[in-house]
Amino acid sequence: MLEIRKTFVVVDEQRHSLGHTDQGGPLRKVAAAAVVENPFAGRGYVEDLAPITDASAAIGAELGDLCVRALGAPVESYGKAGIVGVAGDKEHAHAALTSVFGNEFRRAIGGGTAWISSTKKVGAAGTSIDVPLAFKDEVWVRSHYDTITVSVPDAPLPRELVLIAAVANRGRIGARVGGMTRDQAIDRQRSV
């Protein structure tokens, strides 16, 4: 079990880009973070990190629920990230953000078939991290490549992990770099 000290939710709403708007309405990005005790902090190299991986399912579900409530719209893209306190190892965040976490996160947000992009790092309290976002059903939809920056002012403490799930309601405002469109990806999913 990973004991949660606190949760932290960030909402970022963009209404135009350099004065440009489009038919999609505001871009709303949400990140939900759980600050948890790291059971392996300060223990040096530990071979079996399964206790973190196994316990991460509940965290993925809870953060997914927080994201959905704060987004207030259907989820179109997602991502995940982790920050390890300085008494831990980056591998501890990797262990927490495997498919065990990801599958519960997907269930909570209403599905998704694409790989969930992610990043991890070691840092002190207040360290920021850019959480990558991509379209939840097809990683090649370029309009949805984005990030949301997260920093929890008092976390992670040296023996903690900050585990983050992030979502967005649409692609970037004014996206124009080509590639597969959201609608093409949805049509492709329907034909399979």
Image (tube, rainbow, N blue to C red):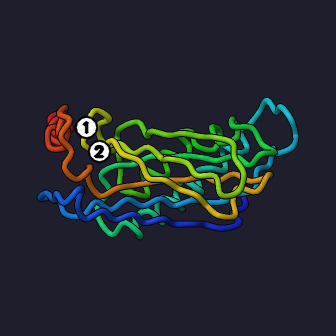
Q: Residue at x 43, y 40 (%)?
A: 116
Q: How many marks?
A: 2
Q: Residue at x 34, y 56 (%)?
A: 168
Residue 25: % across, % down: 19, 63
* Image quadrant assignment for residue 47: top right
Instruction: Specify whether 95 is left or right of 33.
Output: right
The residue that mark 1 highlights is 141
Q: Residues within 10 Å of mark 1 (few under 14, many from 20)?
A: many
Q: Residues within 10 Å of mark 2 (few under 14, many from 20)?
A: many
Please, is residue 2 above or below residue 179 in the view?
Answer: below
Quarter containing the C terminus: top left
Looking at the rendered structure, the kind of residue marked 2 is: His
Q: Secondary structure at mark 1?
A: loop
91 vs 111, nearest the viewer: 91
Residue 55: % across, % down: 66, 50
Residue 149: % across, % down: 48, 53
Q: Secondary structure at mark 2?
A: helix
Please, is residue 160 above or below residue 47 in the view?
Answer: below
Quarter containing the N terminus: bottom right
Q: Residue at x 28, y 60 (%)?
A: 27
Q: Residue at x 34, y 40 (%)?
A: 113
Q: Residue placed farthest to the right in the image?
A: 43
Q: What's the mark number on residue 99?
A: none
178 vs 137, nearest the viewer: 178
Looking at the rendered structure, the kind of residue marked 1 is: Val
Instruction: Specify whether 13 is left or right of 130.
Output: left
- CB under 8 Å between discs 2 and 1: yes
The residue that mark 2 highlights is 144
* Image quadrant assignment for residue 14: bottom left
| Alpha-carbon span between mark 2 and mark 1 | 6 Å
